[in-house]
Image: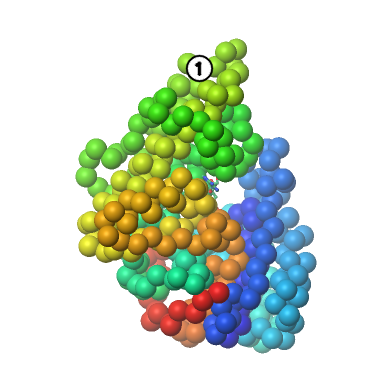
Amino acid sequence: MRVLGLETSCDETGIAVYDSEQGLLAHRIYSQIAVHAEYGGVVPELASRDHIRKAVPLIKEVLADANMTLADLDGVAFTRGPGLVGALLVGACLGRSLAWALDIPAIGVHHMEGHLLAPMLEADAPEFPFVALLVSGGHTQLVQVDGIGRYTLLGESIDDAAGEAFDKAAKMMGLPYPGGPYLARLAEQGDAQRFRFPRPMTDRPGLDFSFSGLKTATRTTILACANDGVLAKQDQADIAAGFQQAVVDTLVIKCKRALQQTGLTRLIIAGGVGANRELRSKLKAAVEGLGGQVFYPRPELCTDNGAMIAYAGTQRLLAGECEPLAVAAVPRWPMDSLAAIEPMESVHG
Ligand code: KG4
Ligand code: ZN
């Protein structure tokens, strides 16, 4: 079965074709960063309009990359939620009507389920059950995954998401939007030991996170170091390194605790912050130290992409689910409302 995946929940237009026999055939991501950069954050109306401009040309490019035409498709998957409603509606209208025109089934996919299953696109796909750390701009969650649609929330952030914390700290330091990757790059030149930032909620039991206190600590440190509101290059790099280390340590402590608490040995990392190199290497060392194994999607499949939507949609279509003719977008959509389906044999992309 060949399924077209459309991701339009936020500021990336992601398009892909996944084949249930051959794996990922092609995928492309168009990032709207340049559109939103001058506003310092995503402007929902501009996001919707840009998805409209880019989705169809990208579909054509991806089909050409896969050496296919629309007639070769067996299904269409689109992100139904959660996300920005206008942006979601672009993918939902396009996906639903394209499937109707081609007389093939459509399926609306949960964005976070897409992230969670993204490691399945890799050659060393994990087996169920595993613990997933979902770290994106909007979510920080630890989830026990017993199968597709069989998710138990173990813990989550009570305030800012990890990506949001990266973006806010970066903004305070005068870095461009979205700040996470810029801050991470700067941190490579910094001394993580010079400033000691808090590791919030690690000194008490439980698997919830809180990142808002880190924000305050970062602001205080910046104010103490800045001269006439300007940070010296080295101070900036040292603050970035100290901040990144605090987030990474916090995530590592909670992941180890989640594995110990569930008795599971496999950890997967998904979501945009999963592209962070320091996080990837520290988690690998920590989990291997416990005798476990870490699985990551390649960095471009950690951030928003169409491949994860095509994959999750394929599994649900193969299990017999499909979308009614109505166009539906769900801006807020709890993941535990998803139906469980039997896992298919993993196919590598
Ligand atoms: O999953 P994603 O692409 O979009 C959401 O669904 O939110 O995640 C985007 C988030 C942003 O906050 C971005 O700054 C962060 O992931 N991010 C990073 C890195 N790359 C992306 N944060 C830290 N280090 C990175 N290398
Ligand atoms: Zn995402």
Q: Please name the residue shown 30% across and 61% down the image.
A: 292
**The C terminus sits in image quarter:** bottom right
The percent position of residue 283, horizontal first and vertical second, equals: 38, 51
Q: Please name the residue shown 63% across and 76% down the image.
A: 25
**The N terminus sits in image quarter:** bottom right
**Label 1 C-beta lies within 8 Å of the nearest ligand 1 atom:** no
Q: Please name the residue shown 40% across and 73% down the image.
A: 148
Q: Please name the residue shown 73% across and 66% down the image.
A: 58
The percent position of residue 246, horizontal first and vertical second, equals: 39, 36
Q: Choose between 319 and 292: the one closer to the eye.
A: 292
In this picture, residue 175 sits left or right of residue 116: right
Q: Which residue is mark 1?
A: 225
Q: Is residue 19 visible?
A: yes
Q: Choose between 3 and 282: the one closer to the eye.
A: 282
Q: Secondary structure at mark 1?
A: helix
Q: Is residue 329 visible?
A: no
- Does residue 162 sit above or below 199 in this rendering? below
Type of amino acid at the residue the image marks with label 1:
Cys
- Does residue 82 sit above or below 17 in this rendering? above
| Quadrant in which residue 199 is drawn | top left
**Is the residue marked by circle 1 packed among few (<14), some (14-19), or many (20+) residues within 10 Å?**
some
- Does residue 256 sit above or below 242 in this rendering? below
Question: For the view shown, which residue lies furthest in the top direction?
Answer: 228
User: How is the structure coloured here?
Assistant: rainbow
- Does residue 204 sit above or below 192 in this rendering? below
In this picture, residue 119 sits left or right of residue 251: right
The percent position of residue 108, horizontal first and vertical second, equals: 55, 72
